[in-house]
Amino acid sequence: MKPVYREVYSFDKKCYERYKLTEDILMEHAAYSIALEIYKRFPKFSKINIVAGPGNNGADGITLARILWGDYIVNLYLPLGAKSNMAKLQLERFLALGGKVKEECESGDVIVDAIFGSGLKRDLDEKIIGFISKMNKAKAFKIACDIPTGIDDKGNLRPVAFKADLTVTMGAEKLALYSDFAKDYVGEIIRADLGVSFNKYKGPTKYHVWERGDLILPIRTTQNSHKKSYGHLGVLAGEKVGAAVLASLAAFNFGCGVVSIVSHREDINIPYEIMHTHHIENFNTLAFGMGLNNHFDDELEDILIFDIPMVIDADMFYKEIIKDFLKKENIVLTPHPKEFASLLKIVGMGEYSIKEIQENRFDLAEEFSNKYPNVVLLLKGANKIIAYKGNLHIDPNGSVALAKGGSGDVLAGMIASLLAQGWHPLKSTIHASLSHSIAGNYNPNYALTPMKLIERIGNILPS
Ligand SMILES: NC(=O)C1=CN([C@@H]2O[C@H](COP(=O)(O)OP(=O)(O)OC[C@H]3O[C@@H](n4cnc5c(N)ncnc54)[C@H](O)[C@@H]3O)[C@@H](O)[C@H]2O)[C@@H](O)CC1
Ligand SMILES: Nc1ncnc2c1ncn2[C@@H]1O[C@H](COP(=O)(O)OP(=O)(O)O)[C@@H](O)[C@H]1O
Ligand SMILES: [K+]
């Protein structure tokens, strides 16, 4: 689990004011950390093209050009000139070394984007958009300095961005690097220290990114136990029974001792290992909403009274009664952006389009969590956001292979499985999400189906 931050200016300030470092020292470390990646990956005299902007992101790029000069063929471009004091100083140093600023773009082995970093304020203009488009088309290894140019502090594209293979981010990782939009642009992310240990640089944060190595699986440790030691989950089946079947099978494969489908219909086919009942009783956990439509509408008041953990999904986010479930403890909500829009409307937090939800995912998840601190919210997407007590936990480990009907039903079943096995709602949600993401990394990425995903839950190796 690694901390991420909305901004790092306050940490840079701490370096200057408390630790007596200078801008020059920080910048030297920033540029040197990119140089190290180039030294590691490319032989001497490879051709390195560096496009530097007018501010301190550009100054990092110019510093890099000076460090590499003599060891590599360095082409430095300054399409907007050098404007900040540091950019001007770094340019003087580069020129003193015999470096030259190029006018016309050449092909190369590496392109470094140091146009804009954390200072991006508005949409890029046509000239820069043209530049970025050329850089993106070039056949070279692409490195972004701090953050790919065009991605703003919320992680949105303004309106295009540099498509990096590697982002070397300065000081601490920024939350913006983990937006759904940024996922196709950041490439591998490496954090650079700026002259003091990360432990001295960083501060407290509400934002954390979870990695594969953090995964905890529900490995059984007690031989003297029986099926009910691992919980009895009830999954409500409504109009689309398949959704409940997928959730049930996922829960069963993820360790839940007994799983039952509750349905008022007789004519449904249920896999042999899943039980079928008509009544909601004897469960220690419930999952419902997936494929439900209006089935069980008359029973939702009664379900409210049960004092057991619940995973609430899909169709439930369109019903007014959802407000009452939010007052309970041990509730996990798993909306996708459209369902989240409906939920926000019902609870009076505003009317948002799906686009607006996606552009404000972090803010809205945090706001919701502050309003409903008892509830765990998992907002689905390319990078899942899990919000609890105003903190955001981000799972960026999933892949586009999961973009298939039924993936979400599997996820709901997996969370419910861990709840049924007695785990805390936040822990259940984080580790079910990580497992779902890891199991969902499938090659070829168009061919994953929910049934294959369920099968793969059993093949995740403990880390
Ligand atoms: N202490 C620090 O501040 C450090 C900063 N560093 C680097 O400095 C960067 C931040 O530097 P700055 O604050 O100077 O910001 P940037 O260099 O990211 O951008 C600021 C400049 O770009 C212009 N600008 C912003 N948006 C624009 C747009 N859409 N079109 C045209 N011009 C636009 C601004 O007017 C300003 O001139 C970081 O991303 C990092 O790379 C590192 O060297 C480490 C230390
Ligand atoms: N591009 C993607 N990258 C990573 N994960 C994705 C992507 N698209 C979808 N997912 C994940 O797949 C699941 C899809 O859920 P959902 O849309 O509710 O599907 P369904 O309702 O059909 O089961 C979510 O967990 C989501 O985070
Ligand atoms: K950049």
Image: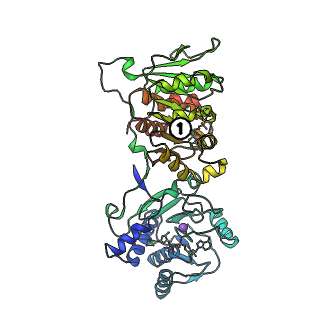
Residue 350 image offset from top left, x and y in percent: 62, 48
Residue position for label 1? 440
Find residue 130 and report its horizontal and vertical position in percent: 69, 69
Amino acid type indicated by mark 1: Gly
Q: Is residue 312 left or right of residue 195?
A: right
Among all residues in the image, which is located at the extreme top? 266
Q: Residues within 10 Å of mark 1 (few under 14, many from 20)?
A: many
Horizontal side, residue 265 vs residue 413: left or right: right
Q: Can residue 111 be seen at all in this image of the molecule?
A: no
For this rendering, which residue is in front, 25 or 108?
A: 25
Q: Quadrant of the C terminus?
A: top left
Q: Which of the 4 image quarters holds residue 124?
A: bottom right
- Is residue 271 visible in the rendered image? The answer is yes
Camera-side residue: 183 or 389? Answer: 389
Ligand 2 image position (quadrant): top right
Q: Secondary structure at mark 1?
A: loop
Q: Nearer the viewer, residue 70 or 388?
A: 388
Q: Is residue 321 above or below residue 128?
A: above
Query: Residue at position x 65%, y 12% from top?
Result: 267
Whether the residue under disc 1 has CB within 8 Å of ligand 2: yes
Count of numbered marks: 1
- The picture places residue 55, in percent across and down from the top left corner, at 53, 76
Q: Nearer the viewer, residue 324 or 234?
A: 324
Vertical order, 171 against 4 (above or below): below
**Residue 29 point in image, percent of width and height:** 39, 71
Tell me the residue at 56%/70% (across/down). 116
| Colour mode of the rendering | rainbow
Identity of the residue furthest to the bottom in this view: 96
Please tell me which residue is depicted at 65% across the width and 27% down the height of the picture: 293
